[in-house]
Image: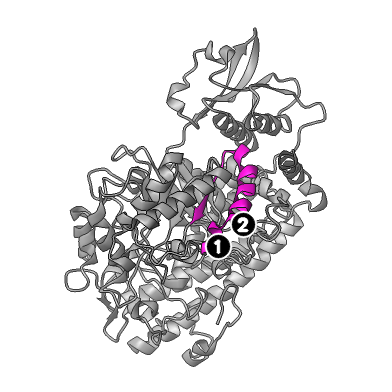
Amino acid sequence: MMKARSGWLGALALLMAGTAHADDGYRLWLRAPAAVPAATTVAIRGNTATLRLAAAELSRVLPAGMTVMVATAADPGVAALRLPFAPLGEEGYLVRTVTLDGRPTLLVAGNSDRGALYGAFALLRHLATGGTAAKATLTSTPKVKLRVLNHWDNLDGTVERGYAGVSLWDWWTLPDFTDPRYTDYARANASIGINGTVLNNVNAKADSLTPRYIAKAAALADVFRPWGIKVYLSARFSAPIELGGLKTADPRDPQVAAWWKAKADEIYRAIPDFGGFLVKANSEGQPGPRDYGASHADGANMLAAAVKPHGGIVMWRAFVYAETDPEDRAKQAYTEFKPLDGTFADNVLVQVKNGAIDFQPREPFHPLFGAMPKTPLVMEFQITKEYLGFATHLAYLGPLFEEVLSAKTGRGDETVASVVDGSSERHRLTGMAGVANIGRDRDWSGSTFNQANWYAFGRMAWDPTLKAEPIAREWAQQTFGTDPQLVDTAVRMMMGSREAVVDYTGALGLAHLMATGHHYGPGPWVADLKRPEWNPVYYHKADRAGIGFDRTKTGSDAVAQYAPPVAKRFADPKTTPERDLLWFHHVGWDRKMASGQTLWEDLVAHYDRGVTYVGDMRRQWDGVRAQVDAERWQKTATYLAVQEREARWWRDASLAYWMSVNGRALPAGVAPPAHDLAWYKAQSFRYVPGHHD
């Protein structure tokens, strides 16, 4: 009873959050006003916690006088209506007015109680964006089966490099105390269709698999279950050595396989609907099967065999790069994984980052998409803004997600989205993962506009063909209300914000230009780190003659990893999109660009454009001050001021460095950097969140 009670208390806490903290962002996009006291009663056909939650959501918002029914398709009365439930699958929903028991009834239903819950939230979204309940006709089915958040949370309460603040999970007080915020978190995820969460960092500790921590994960699973969310754990590959006392973690060793089978059995006894394992192996010092001469498939399949009897899956990350200097870091994942296509077990998915380097503000789509047709590939996006200003810069990532998902792989009309949703090869098991930006801030993710990235990920994981601008609009309407000027302003700010970050941190295909020791602030001059591919100079290769990484035949030939039509386009600087030019080509500073300017002039213009855009966002936000509550307006205004200052820092430091390399003056009329290069190089930020000496 205590666990159930904590769940209902959590839901109540979310409703009451507006009382003590009127508009501090805690309510996210779920700010629909409560109905009048005479609110309608929502009937339920069926007796599950999930159906009761769906009914409770609707009863708080729908106007009085309506007849509303929440049910599943299996109910005899609903089945007799012969509605089109078959195409909805396990999680799809249908909302429409029907005649039930002789009277008009607004039916919210699905083939499962989870489908009905998603239908309830779809109806709430419809109402919050200007729709009416009386004429609501809504239906949708998720195109991706596994829609999962990856929390890079550590057992000590920190989050990897501080990206998301302090961990939402209080491991110390679990399992005894389940914070009401856990329920609020699950509710928010359910509202956008997220159905799984990986609780711990991919740089995993073996302790996560001990009985003590399994019990803590089980407590969270109990909270999440009624909201349709499964828990997953990142597994440390060397756990059989660290916990089991074995001398090896070789996946081909029968003792190792037996240890993992026993561990899986133990987890499933505590968490019957445990989702499975996420694994980072042989990357950035993490142990893995290649330590023993085995392949990634050997490791993944051994773990897959351990969880398969319970219906579990394994998500095996393709983010790998060697300890030694590779020919081109961008090539390594393809080199290691492409030959393994078709060798993974049927409950294994390979999780691939959107680009081949590491969540840069812009990267061309990863060449593995379209190159492994026999293997389901999970798209891994980063919701947290590791390289886009952390939590303070306004950078709406919907356009980044859309840009990657809509890219054509070069195999006919295939897009990255059709690879991810399985439609290209008819994969049964599909997934999309997002590295979470959620912590213990009252507004969950550090700022109001950061919430939009969490929201956009959920909506695009449900349907990868959705577009960024309509998602931004529906988020803004639910977050700020439907005032047209305010919504239009918010959407206008959002839609160009990610491109602005690209402009002031490194346009035209530049990437990985951050300073040493953390992923915050400029450092294109850094060249003294132990491994070549840790250094920004490795990626931009700027010299007096030109700039850019040659990935054509005359360089690393990374273009050859793409399908022939795409490879042909990227191989020629004349046909390479200018946004990716310096990713694939080392070109001269005097190269003529589409703007009519030289490359140098065009690059300078991009830096200035990025800074200008942030200034424009500040002015636009000032213009809607009267329409936004004071607390959220002020925090956003403060962060926009920080962003403008730091955009100028990026711009000035970068231009000072490029000028030191190419020996060129700035174009006429362009403002010089505020300081000399030595000043920018001397800047040190020892206590940046998450950065440890």
Q: Residue at x 25, y 63 (%)?
A: 335
Disc marking residue 24: none
Specify the farthest residue to the top.
Answer: 102
Q: Amino acid at mark 1?
A: Asp
Helix, strand or loop at mark 2: helix
Is 186 displayed left or right of 151 in the figure?
A: right
Residue 537, x across and y down, in percent: 36, 81
Crowd band around label 1 with a 10 angstrom C-alpha radius: few (<14), some (14–19), many (20+): some
CB of mark 2 within 8 Å of CB of mark 1? Answer: yes
Q: Residue at x 45, y 29 (%)?
A: 89
Q: Residue at x 21, y 59 (%)?
A: 567
* Secondary structure mainly formed by the magenta segment: helix
Would you say residue 492 is visible in this rendering? yes
Name the residue beneath numbered marker 2.
Answer: 212
In this rendering, the answer to whether 58 lies above or below 216 is: above
Q: Amino acid at mark 2?
A: Arg
Is 275 displayed left or right of 297 in the figure?
A: right
Q: Dividing the picture into quarters, in which one does residue 447 lie?
A: bottom right
Q: Which residues are magenta?
A: 206-234
Residue 300, x across and y down, in percent: 36, 53
Query: The C terminus lies in which quarter of the figure?
Result: bottom right
Disc 2 or 1, which lies upstream in sequence? 1
Name the residue beneath numbered marker 1.
Answer: 207
Tag count:
2
